[in-house]
Amino acid sequence: MKNDIRKRGRLRLDERLRVLQPIERFKAPPKGWVRALRDALGMTGAQLGTRIGVRPQTVEAIEKSEAAGTIQLNTLRRAAEAMDCTLVYALVPNSSLGAVIEARARKIATRELQRVAHTMRLEAQGTDEADFESRVQAYIRDKLSERDLWNET
């Protein structure tokens, strides 16, 4: 039951996140969003500083920290609001969440089954490679739960 609920949740998230693809559309400008938007609005660092309630030197530090990827979300949100913008924050998977789960399960199953196959070959009890895919699928179905996929081993 929980797996069905989790799967439906993944599908809903995938659907919501699909509109953010391709992610390249949201790549930050070289000097960061704060600087790009401030320049586009014709706003000086001193003017933005006044709107945020900080000194112009702090605005410069904010812009540098954003470009370096070290800015705090709260600081970025304050700068956005001062320029009448909304900060949008999202984690966007590189593929569908279902594909991430499937790839991780396949990796674990393949690793485990290759260990077994290697041991059996050493004991002269090699298995047929032709049915390896069906063994991988059976291992995923019978041995792995979604929660177990993220334990590092």
Image: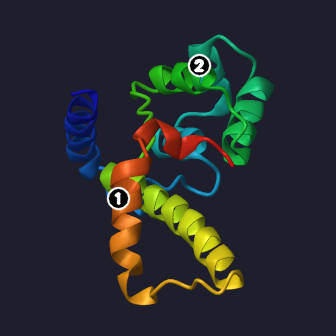
Which residue does the numbered mark 2 point to in the structure image?
74
**Which residue is at the front of the view, 87 or 144?**
144
> Horizontally, is 12 left or right of 144 in the view?
left
Q: Foreground residue, 6 or 20?
A: 6
Mark 1 burial class by Cα count in 10 Å: few <14, some 14-19, many 20+: few
Query: Would you say residue 25 is visible in this rendering?
Result: no
In the rendered image of this protein, does residue 62 appear above or below residue 115?
above
Q: For the residue marked with disc 1, what is the amino acid?
A: Ala
Residue at left offset 68%, top offset 74%: 119
Residue drawn 62% across the image and 77% down it: 120
Specify whether 65 is left or right of 18.
Answer: right
In space, the residues marked 1 and 2 are separated at their CA atoms by 33 Å
The kind of secondary structure element at disc 1 is helix
- Please state the horizontal and vertical placement of residue 132, each as a whole percent of the image: 42, 79
In the displayed orientation, state which residue is furthest to the top: 53
Q: Secondary structure at mark 2?
A: helix
Q: Residue at x 49, y 56 (%)?
A: 27
Q: Position of residue 88 (x, y in %)?
A: 41, 33
Frontmost residue, 24 versus 30? 24
> In the picture provided, is 93 more to the left or to the right than 5?
right
Q: Find residue 69 and name its label.
A: none
Q: Position of residue 66 (x, y in %)?
A: 66, 39
Q: Residues within 10 Å of mark 2 (few under 14, many from 20)?
A: few
Instruction: From the viewer's side, name the closer residue of 58 and 97.
Output: 97
Q: Is residue 1 above or below residue 110?
A: above
- Location of the N terminus by quadrant is top left
The colour scheme used to paint the residues is: rainbow
Q: Please state which amino acid type lies under the numbered disc 2.
A: Asn
Total marks drawn?
2
Q: Is residue 12 visible?
A: yes
Q: Confirm or deny contact between disc 1 and disc 2 (CB under 8 A).
A: no
Which residue in the protein does label 1 denote? 99
